[in-house]
Image: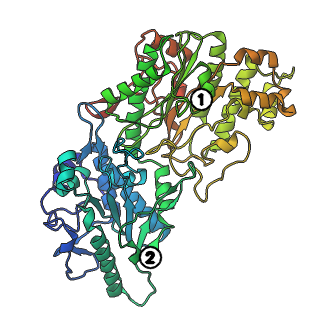
Amino acid sequence: MQFMPPRLLILVYPLLCSTTSSASRWPSITSNIMASTSSPNNVKKAPKTATASTTAGYMMKMPPLADKRSVAEQLCQTCSGPIYSQGLETFQVPMALYEVNRARVVQAMLEKDSSAKGLILLEGGKQTTRYDTDFEPVFRQESYFHYLFGASQYSDCYGVLSLPDGEATLFVPSWGVETETVCGPSPEFEGVKKELGLERVFGVGELKSFVEQEMKRMEDDEEENKSGETSSPPNLFLLKGMNTDSGNFATPASFEGIEKFKTVRDDDTLFGCMAECRVTKSPAEVNLLRYTNWISSMAHVSVMRATRPGMMEYQLESLFQHHTYTHGGCRHMSYTCICACGPSANILHYGHAGRPNSRLLTSNDIALLDMGAEYHCYASDITCSFPVSGTFTEDQRAIYESVLAAQVSILGKLKPGVSWLEMHREAFRHILKGLIKCGVLTAGGEEDVDKVVEEMLDADLGAIFMPHGMGHLIGIDTHDVGGYAAGTPQRSTRPGLKNVRTAREMEEGMVLTVEPGCYFIDPLLEMALANDKQKKFINADRLQDFRGFGGVRLEDDVAITADGCENLTLCPRSAEEVMDVMKGGVWPPEKDVMPELKRSWAVCKEGKMEMLDMES
């Protein structure tokens, strides 16, 4: 398909999202069901044609799915049409991003079964209360629902995506006077349709009749179009499956009367298709992740500059949240902030219940801060490690630079086709070499250090000092889905490797964290000292110098490109960069002193990400 010039797209798009009936307008993204009352109860039959979609007395030719996707991709490139923004200079998210997502899911379903037809039905996130109180935690949309509809601020909704044409219908709640008095007016259908760039928006009360009538229409179409060959009836596709990272299950949508469709209900197909679509990101998704990384990177720098001995860990958390919300419009964190200083870093998920970022910082501490903000439900996941005093000690720098060496090596090797498990082993190698260099481990007089390191790997010694996975997929969720999907390499049972959140080979469009680390965790150290295969490599006396040290982790978010990778995270990484920033140095710097980190320098200006021409 030939793309329309961007200026023409900008002129045409307002017609696509008009609040008046769009049945007579250019139909590339518009509704094929637009009754003037916005109610599916007005649906009536019209004469059938092979290329027509009919409802509310209209008959209109629908564009091919590929054309809808192409137009949506162009709208994403020009940031045209409906956008989401938190105002001021926060990032502008083109809602066409979700049109692309919808087209990808429909295409995946059709690739699995070219004759697939019916309705995809998802139930959105619910506004919950805390325990038995009426306190309402800040709402966050369910991730699969957000992936298709982009309705980050609307709770208690349903969404329908039709097969094979990919039309999207959102069902939003309507409130009574008492609720509206407290919470404001119910969502206005035409306003929501225009805001989100959807074909149709109805009230939740219309869901049952809509599903019944659409399924009946598809059955009637099937009867009229039969030409003797065997054909299956339309299905109601629901989302059900296990998240291989959490072990929790996605819950299928449910509404009163859904049991009527039990004979055509399909709980098996949709989950795998949607999870696999989420594994690789569109260019628009990568650009949104570029923003979350930019604002979170700048927040990390702000925290570095403010850190002093005598502060509390929770103050660092507070400063990060303040920066990302004040300057980036990020109301949500991607996960609980980990502000682990000194021995606190021995606890990998510090900051959770029982360990609430509550330790006093001392001048001898090295801080490990794992914090990332979320914008329009897309995450960032960044870890910085730095000396609280502003200057590395010799031992702190030795551990830091071994972790940095691992990160640089992995970034230099990442490209499509590379095994993620091999990248994890690569991190082990550099951590172990660094520990040999600083005397914690010994090569036993062997001159070939690489040979000794491989022996250490065989003894699973790497898992003692880096017990977590080297990274994970990231997107709408911090630990994004698809890590161990059906048909992909399954989880290893080896120490260390069993904690890797995916064993897949890299593909263009994947976005993952690269997070090597080195820790001195007493229970693991004691296990190693009691293990004959491991203790022979350990210098127990030198190890004592690192008891209570904590750990170092460096974590960047990286997009896999056609021939390598692009680092979306823009934090200080070399020891000199870290110390310079802590002394008030300019950031971003005028010169990139570590181009091997592949940092993709950018800044958000007037709601758009602008690439910087950085000297190296």
- On the rendered structure, is 18 left or right of 253? left
Q: Are there few (<14), some (14-19), or many (20+) residues within 10 Å of tag 2?
A: few
| Labels in figure, total | 2
The picture places residue 543, in percent across and down from the top left corner, at 76, 18
The x, y position of residue 346, in whole percent, is: 63, 26
Instruction: Give the camera-side residue of 614 and 540.
Output: 540
> Looking at the rendering, in which quadrant would you find the N terminus?
bottom left
On screen, residue 243 versus residue 448, left or right, reads left
Residue type at tag 2:
Lys
Which of these two is toward me, 190 or 574?
190
Image depth: mark 2 or mark 1 in front: 2
- Tell which residue pokes out farthest to the bottom in this image: 228
The answer to whether residue 12 is seen in the rendering is no
Q: Image quadrant of residue 394?
A: top right
Query: Which disc, if any, is residue 39?
Result: none
Q: Judging from the image, what secondary structure is the residue with disc 1 in?
A: helix
Q: Residue under label 1, please give it.
A: 407
Q: Is residue 502 visible?
A: yes
Marks 2/1: CA–CA distance: 51 Å
* Sequence-first tag of 2 and 1: 2
